[in-house]
Image (cartoon, grey):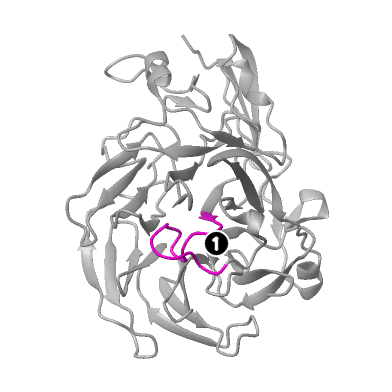
Amino acid sequence: MTRTTLWRTTRHHARLTLLSTLCAAGTGLSSQHAKKPEPPKPAGSTQIITHVARPERRDATQSLINSLELPDGFRATVFADGLKGARMMAVGPDGSIYLTRREAGEVVRLRDHDGDGHAEEREVMASGLKHVHGITIYDGELYVATVKEVMRAPLAPGKGKPDWETLIDDLPDGGQHPNRTLAFGPDGQLYITVGSTCNACPEPNPECATLLVAKPDGSQRRIFAKGLRNTIGFGWHPETGELWGADHGIDFLGDDIPPEELNLLKDGKDYGWPYSWGNKHVNPAVQDPPNGTKEAHAAASEPPMLEFTAHSAPIAMVFCGTTADNTTRGPAAPLGFPADCRGDAFVAMHGSWNRTPPDGYEVLRIRFEGGKPVKSEPFLSGFLTENGKAQFGRPAGLVFAADGSLLVSDDENGVVYRVSHEGR
């Protein structure tokens, strides 16, 4: 039985020390790249030390923007700025970008009229939507999600604020993870992520820590997958049609554990939280579930297909070669990236606050072969500066624009970056 013998916290760069019986395997993740999950190893007595380290914000000056790192042939420019709290994005039929501003409670439409890669026009499509986050477009209508609601309105750019129809008003309370993300699948169904209300606990509401699915009007809502602590970013592979999602691991188990996860999401499956993490490692910090043991629950859970650095916080995920709403419906958006990009995924790593050295603060590219992930690598990086003591951007949202460029929202400085390949 796991026994906690010490828990100590200090205020500055807090050090959390926990003496527990813990699987010793979870400490070998690379600081930058994903790796294939490893099987559990025998348990041992391990001292866990977790640091709270928040890099200080710096303004996104042009000199810092020029220092961003990309593979050869790519460049990053500013598509829009002055959008503090910019999060998720969707692309309209006319190429307009619809963006949520969580803290401001706004949905903003951005438009690049002259094709120079910069949005000259912006229009507030909705305001007063507390904690609005998820956004998608389906069948000529704009869908958004707040903590407890899913709403839709007809797309009417340039005609003022639309009238919103509330489809769902009883999603679970937000708690620790209030960000809801929306997307329509190839099956025409609406998928909604709901994070956990806590770090690691049994949830009284079965819809917490799940991916939900419903009809486009919000009816017939049910749990698609569970045991997902906070899967904000998800999408469908353009060739296989399989659904993938990036999940956040539990806090305060150490700087290097548990890893963030890339999961193949399947109907009816359980992905382990809060009783296990990674490749079926048992969580020592929670009690057994009421209907069994943690070990049995872990053994029956789905393991991740790839792991990322602990606490690097994946937010958005988009596949190269999908339609603008990150599905496989209809023809693919123009491929503004090299052809070998098709089928690879890009993930916005928002960045850690509870590990040292800090990690994330970048966009990763996940290489797929035969429809399966094989590795990840930095794609857009350099937001961490001053040896990790400062940062000038936290990637949040991702979307492929109508011209094939990749847009990256930064909710810290309110910049939307446009990543393009030479010749585009």
Q: Is residue 112 above or below residue 56?
A: below
What is the x, y in percent for residue 177? 42, 48
Q: Is residue 264 above or below residue 132?
A: above
Q: Can you see residue 66?
A: yes
Count of labels shown? 1
Q: Can you see residue 132?
A: no
Task: Give the dominant element type of the magenta stretch: helix, strand or loop.
Answer: loop
Q: Residue 325: name its quadrant.
A: bottom left
Q: Is residue 382 above or below residue 81?
A: above
Helix, strand or loop for disc 1: strand
What is the x, y in percent for residue 308? 61, 38
Q: Is residue 310 left or right of residue 332?
A: right
Viewer-closest of 212 and 412: 212
Segment tinted magenta in the rendering: 317-334
What is the x, y in percent for residue 260? 56, 38
Residue sticking out furthest to the left: 220
Q: Residue 293: name its quadrant.
A: top left
What is the x, y in percent for residue 8? 60, 28
* Neighbour tally class for label 1: few under 14, some 14-19, many 20 plus, Cα within 10 Å: many
Residue at 76% from the left image edge and 69% from the top image edge: 65
- Give the residue at mark 1: 398
Q: Is residue 367 magenta?
A: no
Type of amino acid under label 1 = Leu
Residue at 30% from the left image edge and 53% from the top image edge: 187
Q: Is residue 214 above or below residue 108?
A: above
Quadrant the C terminus occupies: bottom right
Q: Is residue 328 magenta?
A: yes
